[in-house]
């Protein structure tokens, strides 16, 4: 956080325990104004608890939550001036769309005509113009999501928090909405703290990604940084990378069960865990590299993921274009490119599977 | 939780305990020997045997008739279904005295069957059993049918696809899911019939007597308090056992089922068999429910000089000859409405607070409290009424001379209904809705007003209606404490029935009709409000 101003939100060693288990374990986090931060992690990693702690819905066992530099201890939820979009929206079923969006404004005693104007404007903005009188039960999932967003934005919260904002929507809608949300937040200058378990969503939405695991922050960085340089085996595997092996780095190469693998200059020396991204696995003639058998092919749009069984070592995943993809059962050779090889820091006690 | 606890301590536990103490203590010493003496008396054993026997048979018959109806209401779509759903619920809130008179008009001396074929059943056990089925039919149809309609038919379809026959699929998939609800409903019916009073009092004649009737007779006629006390304890133990079983089955039901919207599970009947079933159920409803009520109305209009309003007009005047009435019977209507209104307010306050307390907390203690709230439903109302008389007559609780005594006793039976109706709805209010309101800037009080209240308002009205109807019909306790110059409707009906003469009989029928219309009116008004997330009855 290079900005000199106070961060809008700062968590200072925040700890939340449920019995023995720490849902949040001394978490430090900062969000500056106009930034979109996405907390990414598997279920049970403590990301929803993080939002609840910031909102004041969950008591904090240790540490401080600061908004605009002010400690929020003892400030009840309804005075924190935040927006929170719940996972399943939690729209008020007995109110219509307009009543839901207007709720936050009414709580602040905003004048009636101003409420009506703001509600109309917000519904226009989220693509539901004139929907004020519609019943909540009559809305589709995507429409509910838009209403929930409009409701959260209406009181102009200083920080908007989103809990799995697109979790329940189907894939096509999700991809479209992610783009819309990003544009909207950019235009409004909203500060956003979102949590999700979907890496695609996080990378598409966020300026900065925070990966969480077991109540701890595993990595923080821009989407590109996290994608290119996962900090640990856990992060790598969570992002869907399975080519992780035991290795020892000597100079610009590492000894692995797959043989010698080139690493980038300046890589830390000695024993480590090593990630080879599928894009860095190149197919060659059988005699030119590590001999492997293609055991399965999975179509991922233009790319095909190949599952390879090498003569030695664990199975390998490779990505190649649809045109070049060999049939299952083909014998191929494999080489590795250094720029897609990442030396991972070894985490004590980290599990190898997930 | 403090208010409901205090209410039950003062107006339930204290009077009942006082009665039992008075019965079993003599010269400052406990006389537990009395228990043994009473329980070996062959006459008492006969009463106990009959009480249990008729309750079992009544429950069995009710299930036999009502389960097919529950199926029809759950799975078939047919015109008039909503109205019929309301109709089957009417008997349950009818005062037992009205039910008794209706069956008397149908099966009794000079009743419809007597007129037509010379058949009289009024002193036979059949009259009692029929009246019990009439009374509880709606309980089973609505509670079991309500759940049945929310079971996903696709589960049965899944079983069919896996190779189960139609009946096999029902037996293996639907029945286990329905089992706890059927058990819970059966236990409720058993409880109501086990403690039956008004129906037996009117239809049983001298031959048949249940525990509750026996308690009444021992207390009011023979003034044999020790025997009454022992019988009260026996009934108490039986009811507590039934309620414990009931709580257990209800809990099992809550924990295991995945429910769907009832609107998507019913369709029009297909094929001759399904139409036949539908018509059979409709026929049962007509014969069992509409005919007795219709006969009651017909009898009330069938005066000495042909059909007319003779009996209704007689209700308006003070009878010259009678010693039982110092006011016109019609006054009882106004009395009843006032009492029931006050009782409803008390029941809503106490029951609402209890339900709120039960929603907020969890654990063994709360579950015990939950079951405890149901106890007044099954405890001898006669004991409660008499207990009121002997305990609430001295400072600081000198209430005997106030009119408040009657509504207090009536509220006692209203509270369980309020709790049962409110609890599922309060529990269903998602905590996160309140959180959503808080994040949007609503204080806890504001969140309750904006979120909880609108969702609960319907349930509150429904609970009020139930409490009003049962208060209006309460008989066992009221008969003790209502003052002669201020009788309630059921008390007035019973008094009229207890006296000879065609005019009295006709007036009883007329007054019962009035009572029925008031209760049914309240219920039908509520049916419009009733959500599908119905109570746990």
Image (tube, helix red, strand yellow):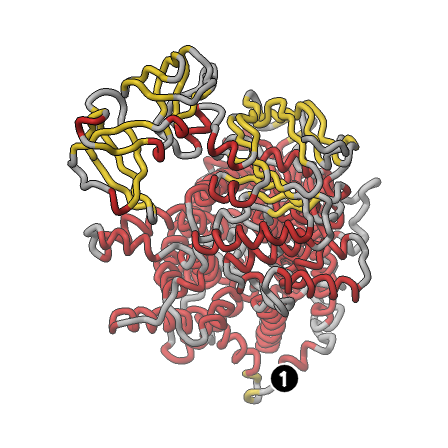
Up-down relation of residue B88 to residue B353 (above or below): below
Q: Position of residue A271 (x, y in %)?
A: 40, 12
Label 1: few (<14), some (14–19) or many (≥20) C-alpha neighbours in 10 Å: some
Residue lying at the far right in this picture: please name it. Answer: B395
- Tell me which corner region of the image, top left, top right, bottom left or bottom right, holds residue B438: top right
Residue at horizontal 80 percent and vertical 58 percent from the top = A110
Image location of residue A102, percent across then percent down: 71, 59
Q: Closer to the camera, A347 or B210?
A: A347
For residue B276, which quarter of the picture?
bottom left
Return the chain for callout 1: B
Q: Residue at x 70, y 71 (%)?
A: B329
Can see residue A192?
yes
**Could you say which is closer to the camera, residue B80 or residue A141?**
A141
Can residue B238 be seen here? The reply is: no
Residue position marked by numbered label 1 in the rendering? B310
What SS does tag 1 mark?
helix
Residue A95 versus residue A294 in the image, above or below: below
| Residue placed most toward the observer, B501 or A53 | A53
Residue B306: quarter of image: bottom right
> Quadrant where the N terminus of chain B lies?
top right
Q: Is residue A264 left or right of residue B90?
A: left
Relative vertical location of residue A322 with respect to residue A331 in this rendering, above or below: below
Where does residue B195 sit, x and y in percent of width and height? 52, 49
């Amino acid at each position: 956080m290079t900005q000199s101003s106070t961060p809008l939100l700062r968590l200072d060693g925040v700890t939340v325990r449920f019995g023995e288990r720490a849902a949040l374990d001394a978490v430090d986090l900062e969000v500056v104004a106009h930034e979109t931060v996405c907390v990414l992690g598997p279920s049970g990693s403590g990301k929803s608890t993080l939002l609840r702690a910031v909102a004041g819905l969950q008591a904090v066992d240790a540490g401080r939550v600061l908004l605009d530099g002010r400690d929020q201890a003892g400030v009840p939820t309804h005075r924190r001036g935040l927006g929170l979009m719940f996972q399943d929206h939690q729209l008020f079923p007995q109110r219509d769309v307009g009543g839901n969006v207007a709720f936050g404004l009414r709580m602040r005693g905003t004048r009636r005509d101003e409420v009506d104007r703001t509600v109309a404007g917000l519904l226009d903005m989220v693509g539901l113009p004139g929907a004020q009188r519609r019943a909540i039960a009559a809305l589709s999932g995507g429409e509910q999501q838009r209403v929930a967003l409009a409701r959260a934005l209406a009181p102009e919260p200083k920080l908007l928090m989103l809990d799995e904002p697109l979790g329940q929507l189907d894939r096509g809608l999700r991809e479209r909405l992610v783009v819309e949300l990003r544009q909207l937040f950019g235009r409004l200058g909203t500060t956003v703290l979102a949590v999700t378990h979907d890496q695609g969503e996080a990378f598409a939405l966020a300026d900065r990604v925070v990966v969480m695991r077991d109540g701890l922050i595993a990595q923080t960085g821009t989407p590109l940084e996290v994608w290119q340089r996962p900090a640990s085996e856990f992060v790598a595997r969570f992002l869907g990378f399975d080519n992780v092996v035991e290795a020892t780095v000597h100079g610009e190469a590492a000894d692995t069960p797959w043989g010698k693998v080139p690493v980038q200059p300046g890589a830390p020396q000695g024993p480590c865990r090593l990630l080879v991204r599928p894009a860095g696995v190149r197919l060659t003639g059988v005699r030119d590299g590590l001999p492997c058998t293609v055991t399965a092919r999975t179509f991922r749009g233009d790319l095909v993921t190949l599952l390879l069984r090498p003569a030695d070592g664990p199975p390998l995943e490779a990505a190649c274009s649809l045109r070049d993809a060999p049939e299952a059962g083909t014998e191929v050779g494999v080489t590795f490119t250094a720029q897609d090889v990442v030396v991972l820091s070894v985490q004590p006690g980290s599990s190898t599977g997930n | 939780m403090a208010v409901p606890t205090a209410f039950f301590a003062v107006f339930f536990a204290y009077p009942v305990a006082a009665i039992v103490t008075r019965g079993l203590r003599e010269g400052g010493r406990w006389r537990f020997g009395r228990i043994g003496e009473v329980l070996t008396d062959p006459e008492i054993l006969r009463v106990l045997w009959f009480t249990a026997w008729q309750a079992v048979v009544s429950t069995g018959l009710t299930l036999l008739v009502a389960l097919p109806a529950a199926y029809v209401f759950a799975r078939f779509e047919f015109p008039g279904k909503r109205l019929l759903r309301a109709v089957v619920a009417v008997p349950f809130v009818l005062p037992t005295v009205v039910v008794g008179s209706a069956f008397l008009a149908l099966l009794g001396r000079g009743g419809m069957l007597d007129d037509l074929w010379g058949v009289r059943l009024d002193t036979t056990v059949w009259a009692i059993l029929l009246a019990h089925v009439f009374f509880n039919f709606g309980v089973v149809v609505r509670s079991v049918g309500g759940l049945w309609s929310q079971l996903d038919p696709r589960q049965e379809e899944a079983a069919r696809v896996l190779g189960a026959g139609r009946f096999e699929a029902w037996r293996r998939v639907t029945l286990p899911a329905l089992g706890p609800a059927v058990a819970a409903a059966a236990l409720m019916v058993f409880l109501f019939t086990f403690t039956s009073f008004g129906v037996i009092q009117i239809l049983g004649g001298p031959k048949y007597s249940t525990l509750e009737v026996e308690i009444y007779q021992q207390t009011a006629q023979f003034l044999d308090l020790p025997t009454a006390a022992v019988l009260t304890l026996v009934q108490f133990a039986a009811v507590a056992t039934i309620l414990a079983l009931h709580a257990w089955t209800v809990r099992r039901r809550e924990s295991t089922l995945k429910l769907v919207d009832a609107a998507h599970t019913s369709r029009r009947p297909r094929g001759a068999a399904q139409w036949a079933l539908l018509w059979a159920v409709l026929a049962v409803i007509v014969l069992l429910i509409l005919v007795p009520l219709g006969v009651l109305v017909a009898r009330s209009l069938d005066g000495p000089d042909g059909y007319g309003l003779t009996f209704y007009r007689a209700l308006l005047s003070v009878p010259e000859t009678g010693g039982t009435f110092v006011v016109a019977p019609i006054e009882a209507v106004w009395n009843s409405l006032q009492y029931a209104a006050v009782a409803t307010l008390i029941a809503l306050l106490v029951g609402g607070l209890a339900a709120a307390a039960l929603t907020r907390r969890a654990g063994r203690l709360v579950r015990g409290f939950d079951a405890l709230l149901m106890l007044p439903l099954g405890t001898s109302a006669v004991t409660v009424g008499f207990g009121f008389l002997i305990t609430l007559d001295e400072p600081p609780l000198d209430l005997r001379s106030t009119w408040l005594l009657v509504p207090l006793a009536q509220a006692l039976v209203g509270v369980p209904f309020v709790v049962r109706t409110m609890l599922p709805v309060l529990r269903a209010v998602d905590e996160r809705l309140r959180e959503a309101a808080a994040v949007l800037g609503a204080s806890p009080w504001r969140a309750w007003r904006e979120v909880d209240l609108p969702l609960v308002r319907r349930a509150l009205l429904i609970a009020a209606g139930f409490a009003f109807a049962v208060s209006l019909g309460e008989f066992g306790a009221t008969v003790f404490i209502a003052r002669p110059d201020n009788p309630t409707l059921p008390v007035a009906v019973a008094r009229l029935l207890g006296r000879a003469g065609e005019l009295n009989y006709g007036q009883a029928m007329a007054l019962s009709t009035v009572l029925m219309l008031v209760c049914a009116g309240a219920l039908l008004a509520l049916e419009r409000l009733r959500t599908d997330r119905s109570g746990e009855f």
